[in-house]
Image (spheres, rainbow, N blue to C red):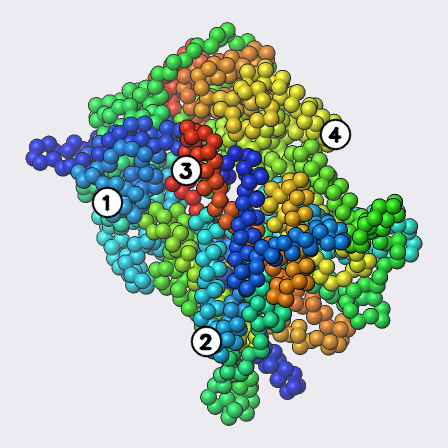
Amino acid sequence: MAQPNEKPSGGTSLPLAIDLLNINKRFGDVHANKDVSLQVASGRIHGIIGENGAGKSTLVSILYGFYTADSGSIKINGVSTPILNSADAIAKGIGMVHQHFMLVPNFTVLENVMLGHEGNLRIDVAAQHTRQTLEKLSADFGLAVDLDMIVEDLPVGLQQRVEILKALFRGAEILILDEPTGVLTPQETEQLFDILRALREQGVTVLLITHKLKEIMAITDDVSVMRAGQMVAHRKTSETSPPELAELMVGRKVLLEVDHSPASPGEDVLVVEDLCLDSPGGAAALKDISFTLRAGEIVGIAGVSGNGQSELLDVLSGITPPTRGGFYLDGRYISGKTPANPATLRDLGVAHVPEDRHKRGIVLPFSAAESIILGYSAASDEGEGWWLSPETLDTHCTRLMQDFDIRPPNPKLASGNFSGGNQQKIVLAREISAQPRLLLVGQPTRGVDIGAIEFIHKQLIALRNAGCAILVVSVELDEIMSLSDRILVMNNGQMVGGLARDEADERRLGLMMAGIGADEQGTGASR
Amino acid sequence: MSSPHDLPRWADIGLIPLINLLAALVVSGIVVAIIGENPIEAMMVMIKGAFVYKGSLGYTLYYATNFIFTGLAVAVAFHAMLFNIGGEGQAYLGGLGAGLVCLMFDSALPAIVLLPLAIMAAAGFGAIWGAVPGYLQAKRGSHIVITTIMFNFLAASIMVWLLAGALKAPGQMSPETRVFSDNAALPFIHEIANAIGWEMARSPLNLSFVVALLACVGVWVLIWRSRLGYAIRATGHSADAAEYAGIPVSRVVIIAMAISGGLAGMMAINEILGVQHRTILNFTSGYGFTGIAVALMGRNHPVGIILASLLFGALYQGGAELDFEFSTITREMVLLIQGLIILFSGGLAYMFNAPLARLLAMMLKGNRQTEARHG
Amino acid sequence: MADLWLQFLLTLDATCRVATPLILCAMAGIFSEKSGVIDISLEGKMLMSAFAAAAVASLTSSALAGLVVAIGISVLLGLLHGLASVTLRGNQVISGLAINILASGLTVTVGIAVFQQGGQTPNLARDERFRPIELPLAEQIGHIPVVGTIYKEVISGHNILVWTAFAAVIVTAIVLTQTRFGLRLRAVGEKPEALDSAGVSVAKTRYLALIIAGVLCGIAGAYLSTAHGSGFVREMTAGKGYIALAAMIFGKWQPRGALLACLLFGFLEAVASRLQGVQLPLIGEAPVDLILALPYLLTVILLAGFVGKAMPPRAIGEPYIKER
């Protein structure tokens, strides 16, 4: 990997391209940015790294005028300036390549670049001028794209180039890229980095938002680390290392070590064999996943969000059928050709605590009693035939609320009115009380307070001891390490490797999560 | 879908519909004033016409019966987050179903068998007319709003063709079926009342009103006490959660539309079996659209729908009285009010939410500051 | 044979006249929907404009004054729809429906108050309406077989508003594809975020689209009562707004496609009225009502995906909220 160029020192230094001081932003109860300060030197590639939910996207949205900060000051090129909307940001020379592209799918590249900055009432005249400008830009920065192609026909890497061209066309001197490589192949990523280097040569300041350690090390000059809404560190990239950054990103949490007697796993419950899933766009979301899960053990899947874990859970729970390969559940084979829907899998003893409880786990307007039968509403335990008796539901719910310490213990309260932790307990109570053979759990303690975290972890251990096979997916490394008997790591849709409980430590796992596999570290155990 | 404003539940259900109604009445009052009449006087005439004069309550309830059926129809579909604009067409075809049964069997079957059969036919035909757009939405992605609008017109064309052609009473000029025999008639409430010694003025109010109330109970049980209703509501609130739960979303959509269409179809029994005793043209006369207003105001709940139907029944009956007493005002005034109500409670829905939320927050607890404003 | 030919031409002639309000409203619908706003209220706007045009023409004896006021009223209704859909982010379908019902009620109510004729406006005299325009040399050329007859019967003799409708198609196509505004309008219906992140106001673009739609519906309404007809009659739009909606969908939200659809639907209506009471071989009496239902049936078939795909603008019906 090329070393970032050092900027020559001496002479008058340019003002900071970006100088943010004590930026605060709340969304309701969520404090997305807490007193965040950021200084980006002009003409350098500056990275912002942090896990999902750390507040990076909010921060750059403020820079680009999508949101206004509640408090704090913004200085661009040394000039104090409020940024009230995107037009302001563009006028100040800030351009942004969003994570989800802002391209009109059925327009041509030319039309997309022109949009909003046509320069003429007539399209044909505007198009001519734009073409000329773009030709020059393409040459300067190595951004070759066929201007007359329809954007949705372009591969993702080229679509991203269009976004960059768009920003440059509008006169961006500061270019922000929000998680640009999530959708790129390794080759396209290299091409992107070449473009970024070319931009830096020409004096453009680049702000790269990412959660990938490799990229930071590969391309940035400076890096800032965000965690839980706060800016926790700044480093010169040449003076830091992946392990240090990993530690800063993930942080040291006050973790109550759960009493964890060794597991005595039983027979195989889940055998996943060469499972593949292609996403609708064609890219592979899961590549040849194989592993086994036995009764009475907890296997944790570690990995940074977006590396295929969500898709894996969707396939194993029956929401998405696999494209190739499949899995055995107690002998029954489920594949693309022999799919099973969530209801069937529940009948086979699979329970699922979904990653996004607001989207899938509970129905916010439903009462707790109604959410607590979600997925089991057709079962005959809660009432007779077609009739759902509220008394039976309430009794059932009250009992679960007692067993799982859900507060307030009010079955009639709307699910959306419970705290995050209690909502999660509702979901957990529901899935655990179904006495499953296999429990799939995604992000068990996301958005959950400390007390509830401990409770939830204890419940999972107890379930394991009772003989259930549990698969836990979490971006919280500490949680994975504390709960799991075995740990598997996913990166880029593949199983990169695995470690047994006593072999695992943050450093090794962090490197695997960053894609630096077990072999490169010299350990085994990935069954 | 996040609601942009935080309103306590009682305010959302109770206050907002009243405010919408008030706003609609105020604007209508302004129109009345502009055309030179006294709005207060007009209001009094409407109220008297709807409730006070002899027989007026019966008329009001007779109109309300129609609205209960069409309102329930819209509400059931709405619980699955589906917009059924096709109430007119579904009701129209319901009239076809009931009419066909009566034409075929009214000389052969006694009322006790004939009437339930006719009611089921009305519901069945309406259900089919609702299920087809539901199927197109679920399986082929066709937007249900557009398809149900088209189906309204298709129904009208079919009915005109049939009533002026194959189903027309022989030897008659007007496009309608022959009159059914007496056993195909739903008894009038005033006749039943008089028979048990209770004085009651003549009105078209008939037994279908009771059926409508039963339908309210049925819908309530379905939506809030049955597994199917649970599935419908889950699908409506969150198709993702329904998918996670293994609920067959496509099937639920089609079933919800079928039930919705069936309820609208039953509106026909009030007109066809209760009042007209033959199938005629255009007996739906906009009641399908009123159902939308009723469901909106009634917050898609049977109790609210009954109240809103009473309101609209009063509007329609009062409107007839207005027409009678004022040379300058006709029944179209009711359409104006109806349009304004739909506008305020549906289109401009959030106009009052924010100011009201702020007012309430100020009044109730000054220190409770929930800021949930978006950019 | 010659008689059949003449009948055919006269039907074409009638088609143009019947299709005019459809074309205007379909173009209006295209502007609204391409900008991402569902507009069911074409019917209501047209009805109110028809009333306004006839009423003002009657009171001022000027069809032109009627046209201007009609356009103004229609634009106001369009802005109301915009208030509900864009600013207040309410339900666009319901707002459209409300406007239609409102129009039905308001036109008759005001009509009775002003004219006391049961909701109608008084019959308009010749010079209070838009008159047919005989093209030069129509009489003379009319004798030339085929070409001349077409010139005389089909092309000549239409009033200015019919020509306006056809011109509107060309203007719509040019605006959408050749102008800056058209580019932005199409963008905002497919991906409003793209326009927003370019620094252009999504709301303003949509409001402008609704205003244009209002103008076109206003012309359509004025045509009905002061050009095609001679006064306002209650419910005179008789569902044409919905047929225009269907034509727009059938034409896949493109001006040319919508024009062809309007002509087709207009042709069906013209044929149907000519076949009224006529006995056809095999079938018996012509099923006029079923023919009139064909536009709706064809639209449903198209929507069901059986005749190619009808893809509405991607972002349609979704109020734009900056939610990330």
The residue indicated by pointer 1 is A92
Q: Position of residue B100 (x, y in %)?
A: 81, 57
| Res. A170 mark | none
Q: Residues within 10 Å of mark 4 (few under 14, many from 20)?
A: few
The residue indicated by pointer 3 is B373
Q: Quadrant of residue C262?
A: bottom right
Q: Chain of mark 2?
A: C
Instruction: Find numbered disc 2 in the image and state the secondary structure of the residue it sits on.
Output: helix
Lateral position of residue B339 relative to residue A156, left or right: right
The residue indicated by pointer 4 is A385
- Residue A151 higher or lower than A262, as above or below: below
Q: Chain of mark 1?
A: A
Residue drawn at point x = 84 percent, y = 63 percent: B178
Q: Do marks 2 and 1 both belong to one polypeptide chain? A: no
Do the numbered discs 1 and 4 sit on residues whose CB atoms are within 8 Å? no
- Residue C31 higher or lower than B68, as above or below: below
Q: Position of residue A404 (x, y in %)?
A: 56, 16
CA distance for labels 4 and 3: 44 Å
Which residue type carries mark 2?
Leu
Residue drawn at point x = 48 percent, y = 68 percent: C70
Q: Nearer the viewer, mark 1 or mark 3?
A: 3
CA distance for labels 3 and 2: 47 Å
Lateral position of residue C197 relative to residue B136, left or right: left
Q: Quadrant of residue A54?
A: top left
The residue indicated by pointer 2 is C64
Instruction: Find numbered disc 3 in the image and state the secondary structure of the residue it sits on.
Output: loop
Which residue type carries mark 1?
Lys
Which residue type carries mark 3?
Arg
Do the numbered discs 2 and 1 sit on residues whose CB atoms are within 8 Å? no
Instruction: Find numbered disc 4 in the image and state the secondary structure of the residue it sits on.
Output: loop
Instruction: Find numbered disc 1 in the image and state the secondary structure of the residue it sits on.
Output: loop
Q: As drawn, which residue projects farthest toward the left?
A: A11
